[in-house]
Amino acid sequence: MKQILQSLKTGDTELVEVPCPQVKQGHLLIRTKASVVSAGTERMLVEFGKANMLDKARQQPDKVRQVLDKIKTDGLIPTIQAVRAKLDQPIPLGYSNAGVVIAVGKGVKEFCVGDRVVSNGSHAEVVCVPENLCAKIPDSVSYEEAAFAVIGSIALQGIRLANPSLGECFVVTGLGLIGLLTVQLLKAQGCRVLGIDFDEYKLELAKKFGADIVNLSKGEDAVLAAKSFSRGYGVDGVIITASTKSSDPIHRAAEMCRKRGRIVLVGVTGMELSRSDFYEKELLFQVSCSYGPGRYDPMYEQKGLDYPIGFVRWTAQRNFEAVLDMLSSRKIEVKPLISHTFSLDEALEAYKLLAEKSPSLGILIKYPSREDDKLRERTVTLGTQAKDLNISNKRQVTVGVIGAGNFTNQVLLPALKKTGVRLKTIASSTGITGVHAGKRFGFEKATTDIKEIVQDDEIDAVFITTRHNTHAAFVIEALKAGKHVFVEKPLCLNKEELEHIKQVILPDKQILMVGFNRRFSPLTKKMKELINSMKNPMMMVMMVNAGYIPKDHWVHDIEVGGGRIVGEACHFIDLLRYLTGHKIVNIKASMMGDAPGVEIREDKVTFTLSFADGSVGTVHYFANGHKSFPKERLEVFVEGRILVLDNFKSLIGYGWQGFKKMKLLSQDKGHREGIKAFIDAVSTAKGYPIPLEELFEVTKASFDVLEKTYC
């Protein structure tokens, strides 16, 4: 299928052949009939992409601060690589889509195959969208009209926040697509409306929809016009749907309003507010968020939990339905808003209009009729890679990768490519990231169907880098298919999954490795070399400045991410286990106490591991520190000597004969060496890079730590 993607790095827009996405639980798979280009939002993305790095930085000062913090902790080169990789990721354009349901995911109750629906799906022939971000199209509304519903709901949500009543007078500043829909919705609610813009064509449309107008291009005074329009009182409210870097629309809105008037920002403007503008009139100012309540709430969007109508009357989905009802009753008209219509194959012309700032309003994209079998193909061919067999005493390993997120692109694939493997197939849930990564690193195929990988007899090894809750199932499926498996931490999320993995693996025939990379760092190896000459037990202190992750992030969801102890702190259990070389015999753990203002406790934990040789290691895993402080620091005390590992950039020895310091040019956490060790093990069949029993031991220990924090 085809999809429109845009590069944040260059601003280039492409029509790309990608695999059909898989339908997920609680989602609908929708075959698109029509979609609408949001000129304001999508033009901003194109302009951001085309800007140079300095201008990009100026537009996102918060991101610049994050980059500076990362340079302090990780070093300059890794930070530059991470920024480039992030900007290199393509993003899907579009969010106002109409089509027909071709598949429903598990748990979907309100929709069936064949339903005509709107969604916030992108510009693609097939989209996969959460049930709560879809709504059924009335029979009297065409796909072309319905495609405006999601954009219309943005206008409607702004109006709901302004809370207009019959007979009130409102100003709409900025008569683009959302502005003109706002005009119509306000008129339908019995309000008097004054529209303000520079564009005469848009002003004429507003006038046709029943608004009075102010033409700024002719030098007309909007404040005086608003005063006259409101019979000298000042308008009841202003809804700003303009897109500008200037703060003038907000300042002008304050001057137009009566005492205790309302200002709602739907568009994007400068935010330099004058206190006197708002103080004297006690004005209310609010920024509207997208389609309405539920948007950006993972419980609403991804888990399908609706807000009770008795408490939240208008959710995002119910706003969609309201706009569709208005279209059905002809209270709002969208056909006059269509300035251009393109077929999907011609869609890039639409983005030329945006880039050139040619006059346009509603740009409609229509989708061709294609055979369903062709449209729903879940694997696409990217190219071929020459086989290079019998390299020295090794054989070339053929690899499949499941997952194409940031870690895969920034860390795993660059390291994997250097090993000389044959990159056969890469899988991702949407297909977009898989195709991009596949082309960049030289894969032969991209797919949204993992069976394409696990059932491929040519593929020797499978790499798994998906969300944590999928690891165990993918590991088990790949092992059952006879593959060698490299899975990013964690191996699994509970003891039951761990036991299942133990049952299916064939240790003499298959290599299983978890991405416990820190043991492969050159600094860790040097520590191990020095420690091996000691006879007495060690005392170890590991400090992890883990950093704050918001409460609603998936990693905190025990069912999805497993929590940060299982999901990340397992790294440090493995590191200490490697350095001692002995089994863990006892675990103690405690976390921050329950106190007002502490949303998450499980990411502020201290746990102590006792080892069979008498060594003891304590890990302080804290998410309440400052970003500028180094993230990871390990201190080892043994036989009157000390080793200090600082953020995998330097190792300092105190009291060691012949060793004082080892410093790297940039941080090296051992990712590259760990991946190389796995590929070498597969190609030479010389055993496990990490002993299998240690993988299982460390994984179980992470579960035990989590359990003991609550004891």
Image: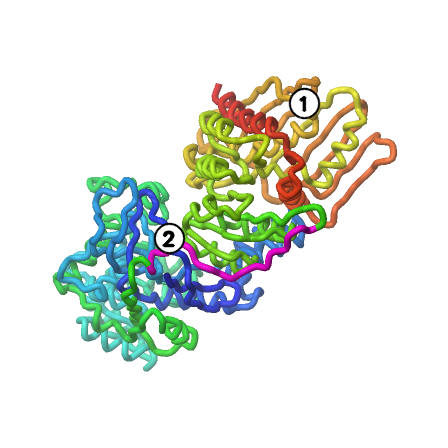
Q: Residue at x 22, y 50 (%)?
A: 113
Q: Nearer the viewer, residue 503 or 393?
A: 393
Closer to the camera, 702 or 124?
124
Q: Give the range drawn in magenta.
A: 374-391
Q: Which residue is drawn at 33% across and 75% down?
A: 360
Q: How crowded is mark 2: few (under 14 residues within 10 Å), some or many (20 or more)?
A: many
Q: Where is residue 552 in the image (x, y as percent from the top left)?
A: 42, 40
- Position of 416 with respect to 289 (left or right) is right
The amino acid pointed to by label 1 is His
Residue 525 pos. (x, y %):
73, 36
Colouring convention used in this rendered image of the protein? rainbow
Could you say whether the residue bearing mark 1 is in a helix, strand or loop? loop
**Of the image marks 1 and 2, the number of the one nearer the N terminus:** 2
Picture disc at residue 21: 2
Label 1, on which residue? 582
Q: Examine the residues drawn in magenta and state their main secondary structure.
A: loop
> Is residue 78 covered in magenta?
no
